Amino acid sequence: MVSTATRYYEFVGGHSFESLFAQYKDASQLGCMDIGGSPSAASGLDFYRRPNGKAAAFAWLTSAGVYVGSLLFASQGARDSVVYDPELIPFPTSAAARALRSP
């Protein structure tokens, strides 16, 4: 997975970087998730890894909120997703944030 401030891309397959990206030279094979928001906003993509080192879940910080999901690695090919149960956890509105801070 690779992210920008408004999109994330999934790259599936290959045993090296060269073989992984070779199948995506045709732009029609490249899929992405577009969350919208401000392209100039800060963003970040992080993974939860199991003790064996394999990523099991991810969190992607966007201007719209935090997009989270689990990862399932099976026999996916190009354009297949490894993400399941994704959810956008929106940031609270200003009024909701003030209500949380009020005693």
Image: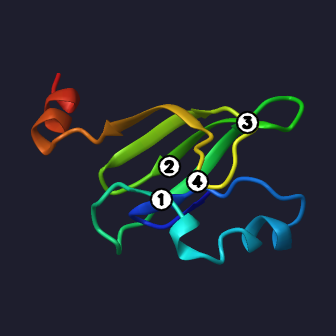
Q: Nearer the viewer, mark 4 or mark 1?
A: 4
Mark 4 Cα within 10 Å, few/some/many (few <14, many 20+)?
A: some
Image quadrant occupied by the C terminus: top left
Q: Amino acid at mark 2?
A: Trp
Tell which circle, 4 or 1, labels the residue nearer the N-terminal end.
1
Residue pointed to by mark 2 = 60
Mark 2, secondary structure of its residue: strand
Tag 3 near tag 1, CB within 8 Å:
no
Q: Amino acid at mark 4?
A: Arg
Q: Which mark is residue 79?
A: 4
Tag 1 near tag 2, CB within 8 Å:
no
Q: CA distance from mark 1 to mark 2?
A: 14 Å
Q: Position of residue 47 (x, y in %)?
A: 66, 43
Q: Amino acid at mark 3?
A: Phe
Q: Residue at x 84, y 73 (%)?
A: 18
Q: Nearer the viewer, mark 2 or mark 3?
A: 3
Mark 4, secondary structure of its residue: loop
Q: Amino acid at mark 1?
A: Cys
Q: In this view of the protein, which residue sits in the foreground, 32 or 22?
A: 22
Q: Residue at x 44, y 62 (%)?
A: 7
Colouring mode (rainbow / by chain / secondary structure / one colour): rainbow
Q: CA distance from mark 4 to mark 1?
A: 9 Å
Q: Residue at x 67, y 32 (%)?
A: 72
Q: Quadrant of residue 82?
A: top right
